[in-house]
Image (tube, helix red, strand yellow):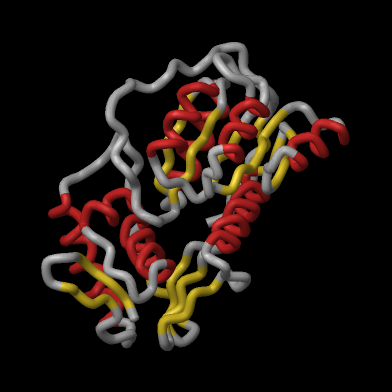
Amino acid sequence: MHRHFLFAGRGARRESTEAAGRLPDRAEAMNILIIEDSKVIAGALRDGLSRLGYAVDAVGDGLAGLEYARHRSYDVIILDLMLPGLDGLSVLQRLRKEEQPAHVLILSAKGQVEDRVRGLQLGADDYMVKPFSFNELCARLASLVRRKYDRKNPVLRLGGLEVNTAARELSHQGRRIHATRGEYAILEALALNRGRALTLEQLVDAVHDSDACPGTNVIQVMVCNLRKRLAAAGAGSVIRTRRGVGYYVE
């Protein structure tokens, strides 16, 4: 799937803060938090990244973003700088002071060299200027996720099966395996956590964002269908069941 979007600068409308309450922890999967007050940009990012299989949360002000980051485990936080409630650099400083492990990609209309240097000096892992290319953003996100899992190669290999985290595709011995977005997300999460059993609840987080959360029975159906696809492609029994815990790959 090839897309090249150019998103303009900040919108005039601000996204309202998501409902407060207890925020359940998430598994180590491909989880993205967007802290962006432009409803247009936040919505476009959330839709685009969700279509690619990422589990995405989006909030519209700095204080709400800080609470989400404190209570959930994210791979990458996409952070705007000019935010209501608490500005982006202050959010970044608090995250780093609290030693939050998520990588932070600043996405801002502030594109002067001193702005970029300041953001990186305060602990950001990357910096992009609006307007921006969606394809480039996705490539940078994938790079940051690989860095978190200490993997330089975007291709995860499970025997003859390959999980391409950059193209978000599956293949076996060079032949592509067609899978749904959810099926791919499940296998990617398992491959990134190779040897560790993930629960059904953790796989729900790997597949869906917090506003579209299905029952765990849906995950079981997805795993069943994915096993059939892999077997039909000659990849064998890649996904194992650990009774009473969940699924894993070796």
Q: Nearer the viewer, residue 30 or 150?
A: 150
Taking 217 as reference, is 146 left or right?
A: right
Q: Could you say where residue 174 lies in the image, as x and y percent from the top left? A: 49, 84
Q: Residue furthest top?
A: 12
Residue at 82%, 39% (x, y): give it.
Answer: 117
Left or right of 156 on screen, residue 186: left
**In which quarter of the view is residue 30 placed?**
bottom left
Image quadrant holding the C terminus, namely bottom left
Horizontally, residue 10 falls left or right of residue 236, namely: right
Q: Where is residue 57 drawn, in percent x and y?
A: 42, 36
Q: Please report the residue visible at 62 percent of the width from the left and 70 percent of the height from the top.
A: 152
Image spot of residue 157 (x, y percent): 47, 80
Determine the residue positioned at 43% across, 71% down. 170
Q: Position of residue 79 (x, y in %)?
A: 60, 34
**Count of labels in the image:** 0
Residue occupying the far right of the picture: 113
As drawn, 81 above or below 168: above
The image shows residue 244, relative to residue 31, as above or below, that is: below
Residue drawn at 72 percent across, 42 percent down: 127
**143 up-or-down from 118: above or below:** below
225 versus 136 height, above or below: below
Identify which residue, 242 or 67, lies in the foreground: 67
